[in-house]
């Protein structure tokens, strides 16, 4: 069926090259080729379209497809050249998608400042829309717009982490915390902080994983941060340290979990959603004693410490 459509469009293009809607015909044929995964033929039609009919409304989606082809071919600089054409049209509905793809393209080129720049640009774009719509009608972003914005916020943790791996001093934990808090002040902030914690763990940055946990925990206990993900960040650190058998740090982190739970109870807050995970016993080879820990013994095990 698709091949028949392509054939019909080819006849139209060959027979009526001056047809009023010829630009649209090239676009549709390009889409047809794209559907059957003939990217070479599709790219040829799209390039002809954007070159010969630069003012046609189909040029923007054509540039988006050309950028996607370049990304698939790992030609990120080429993709950026196409996406910059879409960036010139902020009123077009492809605009925020182009910014998102540019952020990733620069990330793949290891250009973290530019990657973060385009992530920020897209987030600010949505913030402006949200503010405008809220003031005008009291409505929020559409579900799809909100989803793309949240994806960009979460991916900003990935972009920043790459900067940290390139230059730990320039992209330190303290700077990361301040950066993310400036980027978002809503419910997505906690998810960003948790994702960053998981990235530190996945790449075995043990010291900075603990530093990150302490930064978040201090802000939470001081009332400067209210995030349902704080406990999950502490638990993520705890699990990693336990796997590493860094027992003094494990005990300290277990005490952090107790302190966080007591903090939530003190202020009458609903317990953190992750607290259920923290209710299981924390078995730690005995190293020291603590008021928050008691000794217990299993028939087949040595003395251990269990969190209560």
Image: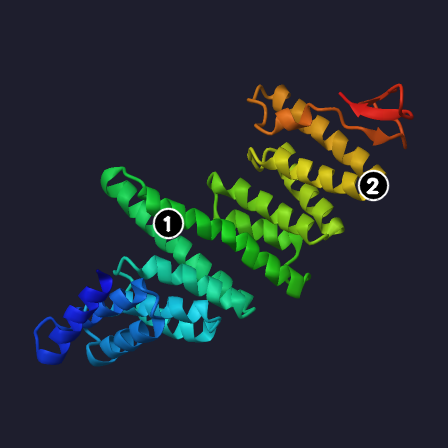
- How many other residues sit within 10 Å of disc 1, few (<14), some (14-19) or many (≥20)? some
**Residue 230 against residue 212 in the figure, above or below:** above
**Residue 120 against residue 133 in the figure, above or below:** below
Q: Residue at x 60, y 49 (%)?
A: 196
The residue where tag 2 is placed is: 245
Report whether 287 appears left or right of 93: right
Report whether 293 appears left or right of 95: right
**Which quadrant is home to the C terminus?**
top right
Where residue 178 sits: x, y (%)? 58, 50
CA separation in Å, label 1 and label 2: 44 Å
Where residue 5 sits: x, y (%)? 18, 65
Q: Is residue 87 visible?
A: no
Report whether 13 appears left or right of 213: left
Where residue 188 sits: x, y (%)? 48, 42
Look at the numbered disc 1 and give the secondary structure of its residue.
helix
Where residue 125 sits: x, y (%)? 36, 55
- How many other residues sit within 10 Å of disc 2, few (<14), some (14-19) or many (≥20)? few
Q: Residue at x 28, y 38 (%)?
A: 139
Colour option used: rainbow
Look at the numbered disc 2 and give the secondary structure of its residue.
loop
Q: Is residue 96 visible?
A: yes
**Which quadrant is home to the N terminus?**
bottom left
Q: Residue at x 77, y 41 (%)?
A: 243
Which numbered mark, 1 or 2, is in the foreground of this view? 2
* Res 301 → quadrant: top right
Q: Residue at x 21, y 68 (%)?
A: 6
Quick one: 49 or 54, which is closer to the camera?
49
Quick one: 170 or 143, which is closer to the camera?
143
* Res 59 → quadrant: bottom left
The residue where tag 1 is placed is: 127
């Amino acid at each position: 069926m698709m091949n028949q459509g392509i054939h019909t469009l080819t006849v139209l293009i060959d027979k009526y090259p001056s047809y009023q809607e010829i630009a649209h015909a090239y676009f549709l044929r390009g889409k047809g080729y794209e559907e059957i995964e003939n990217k070479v033929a599709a790219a040829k039609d799209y390039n002809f379209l954007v070159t010969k009919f630069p003012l046609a409304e189909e040029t923007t989606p054509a540039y988006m497809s050309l950028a996607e082809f370049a990304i698939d071919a790992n030609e990120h600089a080429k993709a950026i050249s196409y996406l910059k054409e879409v960036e010139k049209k902020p009123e077009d509905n492809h605009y925020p998608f182009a910014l998102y793809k540019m952020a990733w393209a620069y990330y793949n080129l290891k250009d973290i400042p530019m990657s973060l720049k385009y992530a920020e640009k897209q987030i600010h774009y949505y913030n402006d829309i949200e503010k405008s719509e809220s003031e005008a009608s009291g409505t929020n972003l559409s579900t799809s717009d909100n989803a793309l914005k949240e994806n960009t916020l979460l991916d900003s943790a990935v972009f920043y982490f790459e900067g940290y791996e390139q230059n730990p001093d320039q992209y330190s934990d303290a700077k990361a915390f301040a950066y993310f808090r400036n980027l978002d002040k809503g419910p997505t902030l906690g998810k960003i902080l948790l994702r960053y914690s998981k990235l530190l763990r996945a790449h075995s940055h043990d010291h900075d994983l603990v530093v990150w946990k302490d930064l978040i925990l201090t802000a939470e206990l001081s009332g400067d941060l209210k995030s349902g993900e704080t406990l999950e960040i502490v638990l993520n650190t705890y699990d990693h340290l336990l796997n590493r058998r860094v027992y003094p740090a494990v005990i300290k982190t277990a005490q952090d979990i107790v302190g966080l739970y007591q903090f939530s109870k003190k202020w009458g807050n609903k317990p953190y959603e992750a607290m259920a995970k923290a209710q299981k016993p924390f078995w730690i080879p005995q190293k020291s004693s603590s008021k928050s820990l008691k000794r217990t013994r299993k028939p087949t095990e040595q003395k251990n410490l269990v969190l209560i």
